[in-house]
Image (tube, helix red, strand yellow):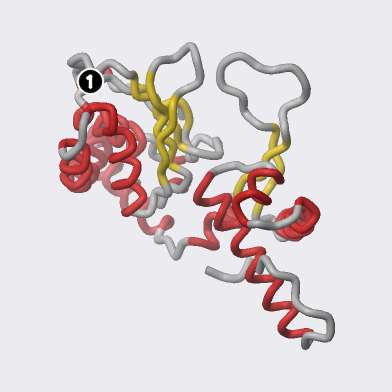
């Protein structure tokens, strides 16, 4: 990744190049924390990184100027509390690109060729399902090794091992279940053009969890994080009823 920013301030009298290196190191940590945890407030970042609010704001100002992050109004799920929502900072497309050496253009061209020469949208769907099926085995093994109430956490851990920076948490009331959040998506730019990739992933989650799931948000659709609702009950559900990507 190219440098985008260290927690300790350099001592007075430190060489200028050391000061600059420290600033870049801290800036990288701020951007990485947003990547790993999703859109974050100044308070979130200060708490995670051990920085003052003023230091975080200074680094965020620089990241905004470099078009690495952008300020947004915080999305509120469930009942909205009084007062204005806190401002959050999310990675831009350029910011995500800084963490990846991706082959998005090649992948998009390959999918366009498949669509035009190998069966249209049905061929793209078949490719997306075959691709995700190849990834599903370790995810299925991870959730089958734990108790039902620990499956969302186990899936999040397995997804993180594949670079998705995933977490699981209780869903806001009145929903009964958990939200699986993927703070990074290696194929987000391609999925903007081909949402079949997101839909196939959602279907795979439904199949390995043995329950209907609902995709609430996706990075490809412009949201800060991919969010999937997993209900608390695990009634039998057909994979065909898996929640669709909102894109």
Q: Quadrant of residue 67?
A: bottom right
Camera sees residue 5? no
Within 10 Å of disc 1 (Cα), the crowding (few <14, some 14-19, many 20+) is few
Which residue is located at x 52 percent, y 46 percent? 37
Above or below residue 86? Residue 4 is: below
* Residue 89 point in image, percent of width and height: 67, 44
Residue at (62% x, 56% y) in the render: 49
Task: Report whether 109 appears left or right of 226.
Answer: left
Which residue does the image show at 60% across and 51% down from the upper left?
48
Q: Is residue 106 left or right of residue 147?
A: right
Q: Secondary structure at mark 1?
A: helix
Where is 235 relative to 161, above or below?
above
Q: What x and y, as percent, mark residue 113?
A: 30, 49
Number of numbered markers: 1
Which residue bears the numbered disc 1? 240
User: Compared with residue 210, is residue 123 higher up or lower down, i.e. above or below?
Assistant: below
Identify which residue is drawn at 60% across, 49% down: 91
Residue 44 is situated, as x and y percent measured from the top left of the image, at: 64, 44
Of residues 93 and 54, which is closer to you in this image? 54
Front-lying residue, 121 or 3: 3
Q: Which residue is more in the foreground, 232 or 247?
A: 232
Residue 72 sits in quarter: top right
Q: Is residue 109 above or below residue 74?
A: below
Name of the residue lying farthest toward the right: 13
Task: Kindly tell me whether residue 152 is visible in this rendering.
Answer: yes
Q: Position of residue 208 (x, y in %)?
A: 20, 32
Judge left or right: residue 16 versus residue 21.
right
């Amino acid at each position: 990744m190219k440098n985008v920013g260290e927690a300790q301030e350099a001592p007075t009298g430190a060489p200028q190049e050391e000061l600059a290196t420290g600033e870049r190191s801290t800036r990288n940590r701020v951007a990485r924390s947003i990547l790993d945890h999703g859109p974050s407030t100044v308070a979130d970042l200060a708490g995670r990184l051990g920085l003052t609010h003023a230091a975080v704001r200074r680094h965020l100002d620089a990241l905004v100027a470099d078009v690495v992050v952008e300020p947004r109004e915080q999305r509120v799920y469930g009942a909205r509390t009084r007062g204005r929502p806190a401002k959050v900072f999310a990675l831009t497309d350029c910011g995500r690109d800084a963490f990846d050496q991706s082959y998005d253009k090649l992948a998009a061209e390959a999918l366009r060729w498949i669509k035009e020469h190998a069966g249209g949208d049905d061929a793209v769907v078949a490719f997306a399902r075959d691709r995700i099926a190849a990834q599903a085995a370790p995810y299925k093994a991870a959730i089958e090794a734990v108790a039902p109430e620990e499956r969302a956490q186990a899936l999040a851990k397995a997804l993180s091992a594949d670079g998705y920076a995933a977490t699981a948490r209780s869903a806001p009331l009145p929903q009964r279940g958990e939200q699986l959040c993927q703070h990074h998506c290696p194929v987000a730019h391609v999925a903007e053009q081909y949402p079949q990739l997101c839909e196939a992933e959602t279907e795979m989650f439904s199949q390995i969890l043995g329950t209907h799931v609902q995709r609430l948000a996706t990075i490809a659709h412009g949201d800060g994080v991919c969010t999937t609702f997993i209900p608390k009950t695990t009634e039998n559900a057909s994979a065909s009823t898996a929640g669709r990507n909102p894109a």
